[in-house]
Amino acid sequence: MYPSSTLKTGPIGVFDSGYGGLTILEKFRELLPQYDYLYLGDNARTPYGSRSFEIVYEFTLQAVKKLFGLGCPLVVIACNTASAKALRTIQQHDLPHLDPTRRVLGVIRPTVECIGHVTRTRHVGLLATVGTVKSQSYPLEIKKLFPDVQVTGEACPLWVPLVENNEYDSEGADYFVKKYINELLEKDPETDTIILGCTHYPLLQEKIRQFTPPHIRLIAQGELVAESLKDYLHRHPEMNARCTRGRHCRFLTTESVEKFRESASVFLHDKEVDVRNVVLE
Ligand code: DGL
C-alpha cells in the first residue's frame, strides 16, 4: 500500500519536556551510535509533571507533529509523564491520520519488562512525577506482565525543578531526595526494588543511592529503553531501513539556544552542540 520509495527516511526523533530525555538519548548514542538523532526539548514549557492530561497530550502531540514534519520516521517519547498521559492516545487516535507508516514509542513498557525478574519480595516502588504516579500507568503495565507484583508510587514534585535548575548536587537536594524516599518506604517497607520513573532522575542517582537502604535495587531507564529500541529496530527491518545512519545528532529547544547549550552540557559530552530554536503550536 505504501511503496518504499515514498516512505520518509530521517533521524530518530527523541522528545522530552526538557533536559531529562538527554539521559535516554545518551544511552541510544552509546548502544546505537550509527543512527542520526533529532532531540526536541520543550524547555520553555517544562515541567510537564504537574500539568493536566489535556495539556500534556496537546503539547506532546505538537512535538510529535514537529518531529514528523522534520522527517523523523520514528519518535521516542523520552518522558514518562508524556508517555503516561499521551502515548496511547497518539498511537491509537492520531497516528492513523498523521501517517500510519510512522511510529511513536514510549519509555514505560521497556522499563517494566524486567521488573518481575528483579524483585524478590514482589513489592516494587515507583518514584516519578505527580502526573506519572496519578496516571497509574506503571502499576497497570506491571500488572499485565506480573500480576503478583504490588506497586507503590511516590510523587517527587521537586526533583525535576532541582535538575532543571542545576541544583541536583546541592544540600537542598539532599533534603528532598531523602524525604520522598523515606515516604515511599514508610508506605511499603517490604519494597526491594525502586523504579526511577522519570528521565531527569539519573542526574540525582548518586544522592538517591546514598539515601536508599543498600539492599534495595534501583532501576534506571536509559539502558533498558536503549536495549528495547535496538530490539524494536531488529524486529522491524522496514523501520530500521528508514532511520538514517550518519552519526549526526541535532537538538531543538523551545527556549533560548544559549540556555539550552549551557544546561545541556551537564547531560552531554559533545564539544559542539548543534541546537536551534523551534516553536511548537
Ligand atoms: N522527564 C520527564 C519524565 O520522565 C518529566 C519532567 C517534567 O515534569 O516535565 O517524566
Image (cartoon, grey):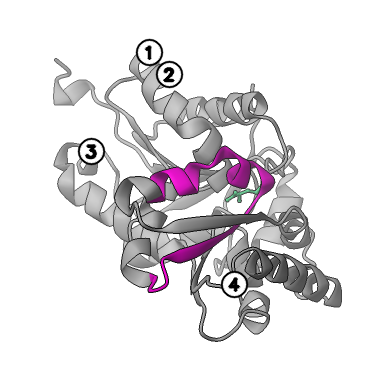
- The span from disc 4 to disc 2 (Cα, nearest Å) is 42 Å
Task: Name the disc covering residue 94, or none.
Answer: 2
- The span from disc 4 to disc 1 (Cα, nearest Å) is 47 Å
- The span from disc 3 to disc 2 (Cα, nearest Å) is 19 Å
- The span from disc 1 to disc 2 (Cα, nearest Å) is 6 Å
In the rendered image, the vertical position of residue 58 relative to residue 122, given as above or below = above
- To which residue does mark 4 refer? 189
Check disc 3 and report its element: helix, strand or loop: helix
Considering only order in the chain, which callout, 2 or 4, is on the residue closer to the N terminus? 2
Q: Nearer the viewer, mark 3 or mark 2?
A: 2
Label 1 residue near ligand 1, CB within 8 Å: no
Considering only order in the chain, which callout, 3 or 4, is on the residue closer to the N terminus? 4
Check disc 4 and report its element: helix, strand or loop: loop
Q: What is the span of residues highlighted in magenta in the rendered image?
A: 119-142
Which residue type does callout 4 highlight?
Pro
Residue 205 sits in which quadrant? Answer: bottom right
- The span from disc 3 to disc 1 (Cα, nearest Å) is 19 Å
Which residue type does callout 3 highlight?
Met
- To which residue does mark 1 refer? 97
- Is residue 170 highlighted in magenta? no
Contact check, label 1 and label 2, Cβ < 8 Å: yes
Considering only order in the chain, which callout, 1 or 4, is on the residue closer to the N terminus? 1
Check disc 1 and report its element: helix, strand or loop: helix
Check disc 2 and report its element: helix, strand or loop: helix
